[in-house]
Image (cartoon, coloured by chain):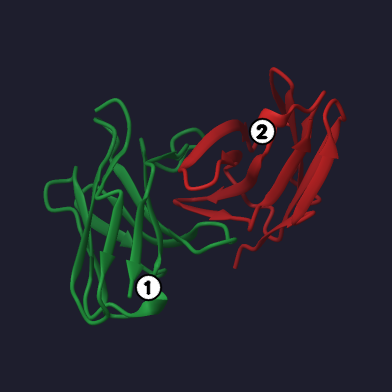
Amino acid sequence: GAGVSQTPSNKVTEKGKYVELRCDPISGHTALYWYRQSLGQGPEFLIYFQGTGAADDSGLPNDRFFAVRPEGSVSTLKIQRTERGDSAVYLCASSFGGRSSGANVLTFGAGSRLTVL
Amino acid sequence: KQEVTQIPAALSVPEGENLVLNCSFTDSAIYNLQWFRQDPGKGLTSLLLIQSSQREQTSGRLNASLDKSSGRSTLYIAASQPGDSATYLCAVSSGFKTIFGAGTRLFVKA
């Protein structure tokens, strides 16, 4: 598509519930990133995909968080047993990937705002 | 571990003033540095990208500089306008990972 698309734009859930957030990257971008942004803070890295595999998941806060990208395009961030502290904006970005200086220019989606009551 | 710091955290200026936002990073082995703008409740919009081999980039009233050896970048905004009010984020890419600063919240008073 023309840009990075994220759904839903807003999600309100109750503590303990399961949540899925979806990201549709720019067509042709092999690299996909998930970030989490809390109020008043910069985006915090969660996980990076190169193709279908998670090349770096060091930012996932704990095992309640999981992300997949089964066909190397759309990605889903999954959060189990949600807690109030999970409330944040979850941002997805994509890029052409690779190690060259121009390849990892990120284009961000508008984000999914998660509120856990 | 790369750390990115932005100073000041917040800034309020009268319309028409020129201003400078600062960004510093701890690991100079970077591929590029990007400046983003974020409006309240919105996603990130890329303003300028400086490759590791470059020293500055310009777009309209914006000019960004990069000094890799000292781990610093500045974003210069000329003749500020109320529409420039937003949060400005600096982001450094090292390999595949992009690390963000906490941002500078700018308010331009009419």
Residue B59 in percent (x, y) is at 67, 20
From the viewer's perspective, tell me whether residue A67 is left or right of residue B86. left
Q: Say few, some or many: other residues with alpha carbon within 10 Å of mark 2 (under 14 / 14 to 19 / 20 or more).
A: few
Let me know if residue B66 appears in the view. Answer: no
Considering only vertical position in the picture, is A100 above or below A17?
above
> Disc 1 sits on a residue from what chain?
A
From the viewer's perspective, tell me whether residue A61 is left or right of residue B30. left
Q: Chain letter for green?
A: A
Residue A60 in percent (x, y) is at 36, 71
Residue A24 in percent (x, y) is at 23, 41
Please tell me which residue lies in front, A99 or A77: A77
Residue of label 2:
B53
- Secondary structure of the residue carrying tag 2 is loop
Q: Colour of chain B?
A: red
Please tell me which residue lies in front, A66 or A80: A80
- Please name the amino acid that badge 2 sits on: Ser
> Disc 2 sits on a residue from what chain?
B
* Real-space CA distance between mark 1 and mark 2, rounded to the nearest whole angstrom: 38 Å
Quick check: do tags 1 and 2 share a chain? no
Q: Which mark is residue A111?
A: none
Q: Residue A86 carries which label?
A: 1
Considering only vertical position in the picture, is A4 above or below A53?
above
- The residue under the point 57% across, 57% down is A42
In which quarter of the view is residue B17 placed?
A: top right
Q: Residue furthest top?
A: B60
Nearer the observer: mark 1 or 2; the answer is 1
Q: Say few, some or many: other residues with alpha carbon within 10 Å of mark 1 (under 14 / 14 to 19 / 20 or more).
A: some
